[in-house]
Amino acid sequence: MIDTPQKERHTLSIIVDNEAGVLARVIGLFAGRGYNIEHLTVAPVDIAGHESRITVVTIGTPKIIEQIKAQLDRLVPIHRVGDLTDEGPSVERELALIKVSGDKEQRLEALRVAEAFRAKRVDSTANSFVFEVTGKTEKIKAFIELMDDLGLVEVVRTGVAALHRGKKIL
Amino acid sequence: MSSKAKSGAAILIKSLEDLGVEVIFGYPGGAVLPIYDELHNHKKIKHILVRHEQAAVHAAEGYARSTGKPGVVLVTSGPGATNAVTGLTDAMLDSIPLVCLSGQVPVQLIGTDAFQEADTVGITRHCTKHNYLIKKADDISKVIHEAFHVATTGRPGPVVVDIPKDVQIFESEKLHKGPIVHRSYRPASKGDDDAIKQAVELLATAKKPIFYTGGGVINSGPKASKLLRKLVQLTGAPITSTLMGLGAYPASDPLYLGMLGMHGTYEANHAMHDCDVMVCIGARFDDRITGRIDAFSPNSKKIHVDIDRSSINKIIHVDVPVVGDVAHVLEVFLKMWKKGRHKLDAPALAQWWDEINHRKTRNCLAYKKNDDVIMPQYAVERLQTLTKGKDVYFTTEVGQHQMWAAQYLEFEEPNRWMTSGGLGTMGYGFPAALGAQVAHPKALVIDVAGEASIQMNIQELSTVMQYNLPVKIFIMNNEYMGMVRQWQELNHEGRYSNSYTASLPDFVKLAESYGATGFMVDHPDALDATITKMIETPGPVIVDCRVEKLANCFPMIPSGAAHNEMILPDEEELKEFEGGAALV
């Protein structure tokens, strides 16, 4: 009867009508009911721009995750809610831009680490770089941690984008 | 524009007409003047001018709850809309179908902190099922039709449509015809046959079954109540109801155990605790019902029929969920039950009834009789007796009087009982009675009130006088916010902080000042005559019924306690449960 304390991380994909206020409805639901948002990504995904796909990474007990999905499902402008964590294998990617600023030795080391992570150098000045790195959240996190000692000054991340593997679609 | 073009306001009113709207409860203001201009001397739609927008929404709730039709509200921008918020939240929690039209500042002024501007769509996002801001006159008709569709289908609820003033003036030719085909909204309706089959098979194994039914049965319509009666009587199992569900099953039936929950009957709560199969229909395991979650009906398998998937497993884990409309699910359930020639185990059921009947002898609604002071329970009993068989609708405010009304009034039919269950809104009952009276002009409509709650929307006396709505207000006056006082006695060692109402008005003179009738009664011997006078006097009547000041409402499951840990009326000592003071 009592919630198992084990919390799980779930990636939810939500297809919504691209109308004014729809993001506020989704975020408001999470805030109002005390659910977690770890990552949030949203953009229109069809050519006409009528539908948007929201990807939310959330953490909760299985019971709470079920509630989140049911609550999202009853919002009027929501077409579909999928749980990529539950519904078989999926690919997850995140993009981050990372600015480092430093002197010679640090710069060289930063370039070496960036290469190891297949990060692209998208901006260079005499005393700074901006790297673009994509990958799973853990990879981004590891890259940022390594850069922390190499003059890291600014980070921006897109949040997670995710799709089912194979032919399966939401 | 061609000659067929009409103003947005005219299109709005035409759309309401097409949707069969007969009554609007509202209050005018700057941002809705074009709509009011269209309503001026309108032949088909009657506008009821309330005295506060909160009351407009509660009136629409009373109208909706007593008819099964959606209620319609019209308010202006800014304060008009914010005053409606309490009513909208009330309708949201009790799943009442409403459409609330609000004026908004002209489109170009939105976001500039214009006069009487409020972000109505933002503010009401959390207290509505859905809301809209219309930016083009061309969209009005379709959005209005859609709003009614959303409000009335699936799990019903309030919908706000915010209409800027310039959009009300702009012209358009677009009038929506035909059904709504929504891009994304797909409410559940039919339950899954396999799930219903599982439910049938589970119930058939029961030795100690119970039906636990709620407001969803009433929302589903009169057919659902009829089917429920058939099913329960076919099985011979006991049935209990939530506060919101009263009337879905006739109170006089021997299978009915009365209300369950915090102030429910001893037999109903114990049967919930001891049952082996629970059939929950259109109820949502609210905290007033379950008491302590980890001690809730520990040995039962549970079936849950609900139109809203998010109600399933929200509070209590259930074994067989059935997502669908109650009437449909019950229809299929009955067919399968009959086709499978299922029958409950008769000896087991007889033994189960023995246990229940033994608990009934505890007579949990008994109270100490008093020859000199009117006991509040006695007052409600007399109201019940003296209105029995009449075409009567009851509403209540919130507090002790509400629970006494729920315990001692007996409802034989659905849609006869209107109360604020989920939100617990003081000030609900009088405007809700007003709305019910508009829908049923010839019926007897009684608001069972407390002297504190009634003052929260007392201004509506003016409205009932203006429209000659003969609402009867029966105030059980104990000079306290009685339920607050009872909880202070229970959890705060009797420190009655701010729960005594000093400087009460003379309710008789108050009634008279509006041109209504007022009676005061303070002795049991005069009670029957006063109630009879109240019923027989034409027009609105207030009865100031002075009752025992310190009476407590029993039986009671204190917060934090389990169903089998009830306090009964003759157990003088109030027990505090661990952590009770922190609970609500």
Image (tube, rainbow, N blue to C red):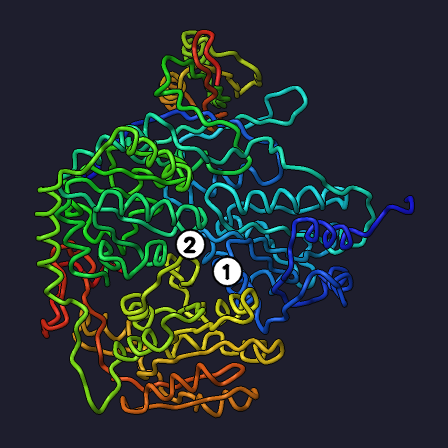
Contact flag, marks 2 and 1 (Cβ < 8 Å)? yes
Visible in this render: residue B492? yes
Instruction: Name the residue nearer the viewer: B529 or A143.
Output: B529
Residue B532 position (above or below residue B129): below
Residue at 38% x, 28% y is B192
Mark 2–mark 1 Cα distance, whole angstroms, equals 10 Å
Which is more N-terminal, label 1 or label 2? Answer: 1
Q: How many marks?
A: 2
Figure check: B346 above or below B70? above
Q: Is residue B414 left or right of residue B553?
A: right
Residue A36 visible, this orientation:
no
Mark 1: secondary structure: helix
User: At which x and y percent is residue B398?
Assistant: 37, 68
What secondary structure is found at the residue carrying circle 2? loop
User: Residue at (37%, 33%) from the top-left corner?
Assistant: B332
Instruction: Give the chain letter at badge 1.
Output: B
Q: In the rendered view, would you say B47 is above or below B455?
A: above
Residue A160 quadrant? top left
Chain that bears disc 2 = B
User: Which residue type does callout 1 highlight?
Assistant: Glu
B10 lies left or right of B402: right
Say which residue label 2 marks.
Answer: B94
Please name the residue that numbered disc 1 is placed on: B61
